[in-house]
Image (cartoon, rainbow, N blue to C red):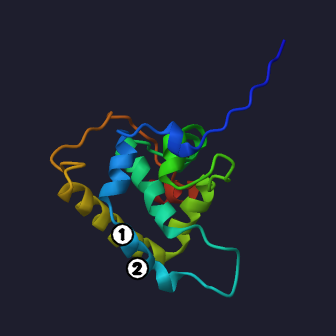
Amino acid sequence: MLQLKLHMVTLEDLVPENHFLRRLDAALDMSFVYEETDGLYSRKYGHPPIDPVMLVKYELLGFLYGIPSKRQIEQRIQADVAVRWYLEMDLFDRVPEHSTISQLRQRKSSFRKVFHRLFEEVVRQCIKKSLVSGRAAGTDSTHVKADASRASEELLKI
């Protein structure tokens, strides 16, 4: 027989005090992100934008946890309470779709340039606070086939 229980908890209660993401959140000053991205968003037109700090944190999570794809980052956010806490998302908030994040970076060259600067600043802060060393990098040596179009393959044959 299925038994239902009601629990009253907050994300704050569910994330351990010594969790790495708590230390990361306390160590990084992300206020510069709003200043850097202010001119990229229209206040009059379109849907409300995804919070630029969330975008930077989204990418940082992929970097720090070694998650290679936006789709896998999206899945991690859906399932991990600590990650939701870090992104300041409620349990019922909709996770930004991986394709939205990818398209934003691919189609908006101005955002791509700013994002590169933002990410460099975040990594600099992480190194300064000894959250990462910057001395070594690991790979799994996975071979990934390029997503080349048939047209470019035909040009290579010529």
One can see residue 156 in this view = no
User: On residue 118, which mark appears?
Assistant: 1
Location of residue 28 by image quarter: bottom left
The answer to whether residue 100 is above or below residue 144 is below
Q: Mark 2 points at which residue?
A: 36
Q: What residue type is labelled 2?
A: Glu
Q: Are marks 1 and 2 in contact (CB under 8 Å)?
A: yes
Q: In which quadrant of the rendered image does the N terminus lie? A: top right
Identity of the residue furthest to the left in this view: 135
On screen, residue 136 versus residue 106, left or right, reads left
Packing grade of label 2 (10 A; few <14, some 14-19, many >=20) is some
The number of numbered badges drawn on the structure is: 2
The answer to whether residue 149 is above or below residue 138 is below
Residue 74 at x, y percent in the picture: 57, 47
Identify the secondary structure beneath mark 2: helix
Q: Which of marks 1 and 2 is nearer the N terminus?
A: 2
Identity of the residue furthest to the right in this view: 1
Residue at 32 percent across and 34 percent down: it is: 141
Q: Nearer the viewer, residue 2 or 105?
A: 2
